[in-house]
Amino acid sequence: MSESDQGLYILSIPGNYWKIGRAFDVEPRIKLLQCGCPEKISLYAFLDVAYHDISASEIEHQLHKRLCLYRTSGEWFHAPRRTIDAAFKEVWAMLLRPDVYARWERFCAHCRVRNMSRAISV
């Protein structure tokens, strides 16, 4: 099996703890992690990237990068679910449709500049 066969998983633990990683088969991974965890680990999402021209490794890297302020240890994060969802949607858009994402980023930058000039002139 090659790295391209891996999928991206997001696991959740009560209290807004999340693990983001890659695996060929997520069930054995959950069982391995569960033996050292007192809380129930649940599969929040699994993305099989085989049908997309995106690697699980790249998605994982981008998610870890965007969630770095929430990192507790290694691949574990402590964040509200909406933060995890927003980061995933942003990364997915960036990797799947970089042209649309670039236009969106330019629009957001323009809005920040315009809002900043209003704040300064007040």
Image (tube, grey):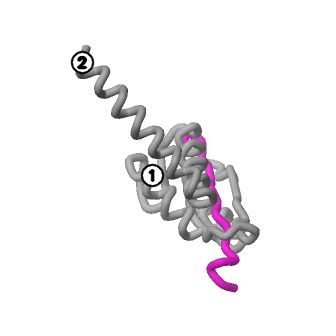
- Which circle, 1 or 2, is nearer the viewer? 2
Residue lying at 24% horizontally and 18% vertically, measured from the top left? 121
Side of 24 where 72 appears, left or right: left
Query: Closer to the N terminus: mark 1 or mark 2?
Result: 1
Q: Position of residue 19 (x, y in %)?
A: 55, 56
Q: Position of residue 8 (x, y in %)?
A: 64, 63
Residue lying at 66% horizontally and 62% vertically, measured from the top left? 30
The dot on residue 13 is none
Q: According to the image, label 2 marks what residue? A: 121
Residue occupying the far bottom of the picture: 1
Q: Position of residue 104 (x, y in %)?
A: 52, 44
Q: Nearer the viewer, residue 29 or 23?
A: 23
Is residue 26 visible in the rendered structure shown here? yes
Callout 2 amino acid: Ser
Please tell me whether residue 84 is drawn above or below residue 35 in the rendered image.
above
Callout 1 amino acid: Arg
Q: Nearer the viewer, residue 49 or 101?
A: 101
Side of 110 where 19 appears, left or right: right
Does 111 appear in magenta? no
Task: Classify the position of the C terminus by image quarter.
Answer: top left
**Distance Cα–Cα, label 1 vs label 2:** 32 Å
Please tell me whether residue 2 is drawn above or below residue 12 in the rendered image.
below
Task: Classify the position of the N terminus by image quarter.
Answer: bottom right
Look at the image and give the residue range highlighted in magenta.
1-17
Q: According to the image, label 1 marks what residue? A: 66
